Amino acid sequence: MSITEKDNQDIIGREDLNDIEAILSVTNTDVDEVLHAVRDDSDALFTWDYSLARPNLRRLYEKAKTGQWNGTTDLPWETPVDIEATIAADQAAIGAGIDPSQYADTPLAKWGEKEWVEFGIEGRRWSLSQFLHGEQGALLCTAKITETVPWYDAKLYASTQVVDEARHVEVFARYLEEKLGGGYQVNAHLRMLLDDIIKDSRWDMTYLGMQVMVEGLALAAFGFMHQLTGEPLLKQLLRYVMSDEARHVAFGVLSLQEAYAGMTDAEIKERQEFAYEASVRMRDRFLQQEVWEKMGVKPKEIVPLVLQDPTRMMFQQMLFAKIVPNCKKLGLLDRNDGWLRHRYEEMGVIQFEDWENTGDEYLQFELGKDAPPPVPH
Ligand SMILES: [Fe+2]
Ligand SMILES: [Fe+2]
């Protein structure tokens, strides 16, 4: 059951999922913007029911209190980072993230080692910058959830996540500034997604957009970078952040399981469409159009090839390794005749549906334990 062009237009703003021209036309036109205002029409809810109604959320709250770390004193900031040597070593270990042989008739064919390393450095600065902006999105979303969620246990937990996210913003911003010489502005696809999540007045949509989709992707992406990089400061930074993120995704899955259990098919359909939209925005942002521009290459020439590049495809699909099983656990894949399942088939990511979901595996990410590998053996 494929999606109609009209439905695609309504949900993601273009008729064809793979319309490159439309994807690349979404750009950040105000790179000097400092403040970005989004109207938020939600009700802030008090609850006078202070009883322990949700032990699983309270357990998570207890874990969060003892899992705190200090971004200033727990990370080895004195580590010198030679970014060229780091990227060259990381590329030697796992490649440049794309397969150079796929770009024969493009400017990339003339690239020597210098250009590939430069591409790697810009890619690293760009990725960490988008993580940073996403972390600020999480900071704002969790402050909002603290206000809007009707459950006492969830308000307690959400308040700990606000502190966690502040710490994540702090360490990514500091790493970019001190070790990489600054970062990139927010990618327009990511900003559209963050705006949509913050704007929505229904409290569960904040969870779905942030805890399940954005943080699910972040957990997979952090795991991947943590495994690949040999830079010790970044490795440790990511490991610390992952220990928090796994809890955050679990918070989303545990809360939404209860919220969705009582929803009608029509209500679930709106959640499925939102999950699809978020997935497409995140896929679009990973085309990293700003990095191509910085390298002096026209994104239009390269991106169609990137979308076909098997090395790149593998990496992109991997990013959905947490999202798909979590959507399955929430019942979002199969309600309404498998509407979201079909979308994930079209995006080529349905194969992850039976991987471990984060509602169960967050304990494995605790500090002091070996985090599970991004790709299970
Ligand atoms: Fe975070
Ligand atoms: Fe988070």
Image: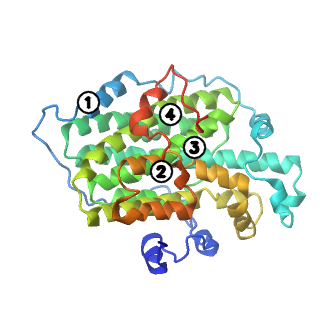
- Where is residue 164? Give x, y as percent: 41, 34
48 lies left or right of 33: left
User: Could you tell me how far apart the alpha carbons at marks 4 and 1 are, in whole angstroms?
Assistant: 20 Å
User: Could you tell me how far apart the alpha carbons at marks 4 and 2 are, in whole angstroms?
Assistant: 18 Å
The disc placed on residue 58 is 1
Q: Which residue is mark 2?
A: 324
Label 3 element class = helix
Along the viewing direction, whichever of 371 and 231 lies nearer the viewer: 371
Which label sits in the foreground, 2 or 1?
2
Which label sits in the foreground, 4 or 2?
2
- Where is residue 26? Give x, y as percent: 56, 69
Q: Quadrant of the C terminus?
A: top right
Along the viewing direction, whichever of 322 and 168 lies nearer the viewer: 322
Whichever of labels 4 and 3 marks the residue nearer the N terminus, that label is 3
Question: For the residue marked with disc 2, what is the amino acid?
Answer: Val
The disc placed on residue 221 is 3
User: Residue at position x 66%, y 51% from top?
Assistant: 314
